[in-house]
């Protein structure tokens, strides 16, 4: 197993174990069970990897330093997926190869679970004695900014505004709904490991473009992949102005590669210590589940 494959396996296993520990330390309520269902048992964990990989550029102990952040990012992402799947939003029956949370748990628990996860995420990220208090505060503010951008992106995605430049509006949606959490996870990981402002900005821009690449590939997956490959039913984006709508499948793949190249160029200022983050950009993919 090469170093990058070992990194992915290690992060996925460590995140799953730590998330299980964190959530199991709470009272066994219906809301907690819903939150567990939405977060555990699958997922790429790309955003967690981004946080740790960005931190590792500046500190070799980034896995330990950034593990609480990586878990918090996955909780925030899990919260967004529970909301995305609701009948009032994307009305998705499956996520990560299993029925969506609202298909299993009572509506009131599903509506409260995302707030539960977000508050858990802030507590986990802030309660990290390995990081200086001022860096923890900066990280919490950054993650708040990402959350606000994600909410704005979700509104654009749901409302599909038709006035003005529709392609530019799609990109605005993608930068907020998808790119923001990747970018902020990277910036906070770098912050926690002592990066300078210029270096934090560089990893932010790299991972914003990485997030865009993943979103474009996710659009391709909605056309070409099935439940067994990506854990959700294809065709959920039918009727939306996605990258497929504007470019078609082939050109959308090319656009995804272009964002990968931009991400890599943002990392040119760094040496071999950024190789794991570079590999995350080079090997952007919508699989495995």
Image: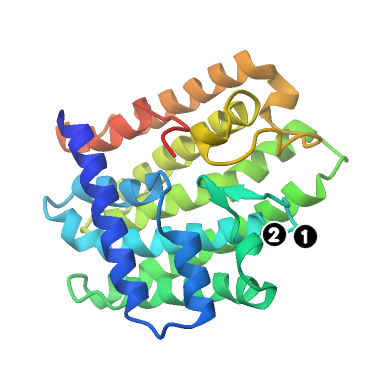
Q: Residues within 10 Å of mark 2 (few under 14, many from 20)?
A: some
Kindly identify the residue that appears in the image at 66 percent across and 51 percent down: 153
Q: Which residue is mark 2?
A: 86
Kindly identify the residue that appears in the image at 33 percent across and 34 percent down: 280
Between 9 and 183, the one lying in front of the other is: 9
Left or right of 150 in this view: 16: left
Looking at the figure, which quarter contains the C terminus?
Answer: top left
Check disc 1 and report its element: helix, strand or loop: loop
Left or right of 62 in this view: 100: right
Q: With respect to residue 192, does 231 lie above or below?
A: above
Q: Quadrant of residue 254?
A: top right
| Residue 271 visible in image | no
All told, the count of numbered labels is 2
Kindly identify the residue that appears in the image at 51 percent across and 36 percent down: 230
Q: Which residue is mark 1?
A: 88
Q: Quadrant of residue 191?
A: bottom left
| Residue 210 visible in image | yes
Q: With respect to residue 208, does 86 lie above or below?
A: below
Between 155 and 120, the one lying in front of the other is: 120
Give the x, y percent position of residue 87.
75, 58
- Looking at this rendering, what residue extends furthest in the bottom direction? 27
Q: With respect to residue 270, does 23 lie above or below?
A: below
Left or right of 159 in this view: 185: left
- Looking at this rendering, what residue extends furthest in the top direction? 250
Q: Which mark is residue 201?
A: none
Left or right of 243 in this view: 175: left
Give the x, y percent position of residue 70.
33, 58
- Looking at the image, do the residues carrying marks 2 and 1 touch, with CB atoms under 8 Å apart? yes
Give the x, y percent position of residue 110.
62, 70
């Amino acid at each position: 197993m090469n170093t990058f494959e070992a990194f992915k396996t290690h992060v996925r296993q460590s995140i799953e174990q730590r998330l299980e520990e964190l959530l199991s330390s709470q009272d066994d309520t219906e809301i907690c069970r819903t939150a567990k269902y939405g977060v555990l048992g699958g997922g790429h964990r790309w955003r967690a990897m981004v946080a740790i990989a960005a931190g590792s550029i500046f500190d070799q102990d980034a896995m330990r330093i950034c593990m609480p952040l990586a878990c918090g990012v996955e909780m925030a992402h899990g919260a967004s997926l529970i909301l995305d799947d609701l009948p009032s939003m994307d009305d998705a029956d499956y996520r990560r190869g299993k029925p969506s949370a609202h298909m299993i748990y009572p509506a009131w628990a599903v509506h409260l679970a995302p707030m539960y996860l977000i508050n858990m995420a802030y507590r986990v990220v802030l309660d990290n004695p390995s990081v200086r208090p001022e860096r923890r505060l900066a990280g919490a503010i950054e993650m708040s900014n990402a959350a606000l951008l994600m909410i704005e992106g979700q509104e654009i995605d749901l409302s599909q505004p038709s006035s003005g430049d529709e392609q530019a509006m799609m990109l605005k949606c993608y930068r907020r709904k998808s790119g923001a959490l990747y970018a902020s996870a990277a910036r906070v990981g770098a912050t926690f490991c002592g990066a300078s402002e210029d270096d934090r900005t560089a990893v932010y821009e790299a991972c914003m473009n990485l997030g865009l690449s993943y979103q474009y590939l996710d659009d391709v997956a909605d056309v070409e992949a099935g439940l067994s490959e990506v854990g959700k039913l294809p065709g959920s984006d039918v009727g939306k102005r996605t990258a497929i709508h504007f470019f078609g499948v082939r050109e959308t793949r090319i656009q995804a590669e272009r964002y990968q190249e931009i991400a890599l160029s943002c990392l040119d200022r760094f040496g071999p210590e950024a190789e794991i983050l570079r590999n995350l950009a080079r090997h952007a993919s919508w699989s495995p589940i």
